[in-house]
Image (spheres, rainbow, N blue to C red):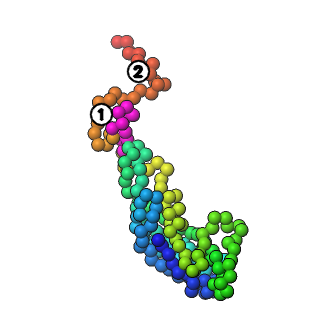
Amino acid sequence: MVEINVSQLLKSSIGTTRSYDIDERVNIGEDNPVVRGEVRLLRTNRGILVTGKLETELVVTCSRCLEQFREPAKLDIEEEFFPTIDILTGAAVAVPEDEPGAFTIDQNNVLDLTEAIRQYALMAVPMKPLCREDCKGLCPTCGKNLNVEGCGCPPPVDPRWAKLVAEKPKE
């Protein structure tokens, strides 16, 4: 978990900043990769704006051969976190209505970046990840991984071209 106590920052004037180095394991899906980088916290009139550049490696599945591999990911985080209690009075504070699903700072003034990092990491996964550029994928007939070994299956024929393949040219 990536937690930062922001009680002093919440007491500070608007525009005050703090920077923190991150080097933590974060639960992202089925993996707990190390996330490294720096985040900057800026006191706003409503809460704390977190910006940062983080790096990690995600375990993803190749869209062609279905093998898992590690994919480097760069995460550019920018999220505003809202307090749930007033730092001076201790009274409950409502999250702004124009921010549905907003990230919050807990009643102990701890800002937890874990969920934000997890969401940004999931968005960083490519739509069709490839283990390598020239991945051969799986044989559509027998299912063997063609990167590991070949198979004796005939190449598949596109049904749109089947009549042309069936007709032998006259010599």
The residue shown at (41%, 68%) is 25
Q: Which residues are magenta?
A: 135-144
Dot 2 amino acid type:
Val
In which quadrant will I find the C terminus? top left
The residue shown at (41%, 50%) is 61
Find residue 140 and report its image quarter: top left
Q: Which residue has dot 2 on it?
A: 165
In the rendered image, residue 112 lying in the magenta stretch gets the answer no
In the picture, measured across the screen, residue 24 lies left or right of residue 106, that is left
The residue shown at (43%, 46%) is 63
Sequence-earlier tag: 2 or 1: 1
Q: Residues within 10 Å of mark 2 (few under 14, many from 20)?
A: few
In the picture, measured across the screen, residue 62 lies left or right of residue 51, that is left
Residue 107, compared with residue 167, is above or below; it is: below
Dot 1 amino acid type:
Cys
Residue 58, compared with residue 11, is above or below; it is: above
Residue 47, compared with residue 12, is above or below; it is: above
In the picture, measured across the screen, residue 169 lies left or right of residue 4, that is left
Q: Residues within 10 Å of mark 1 (few under 14, many from 20)?
A: some
Front position in the image: 85 or 146: 85
Q: Position of residue 132 (x, y in %)?
A: 37, 49
Q: Which residue has dot 1 on it?
A: 151
Front position in the image: 42 or 90: 90
The residue shown at (50%, 66%) is 117
Q: Is residue 148 visible?
A: yes
Residue 169, compared with residue 120, is above or below; it is: above
Front position in the image: 40 or 10: 10
Q: Position of residue 119 (x, y in %)?
A: 53, 62
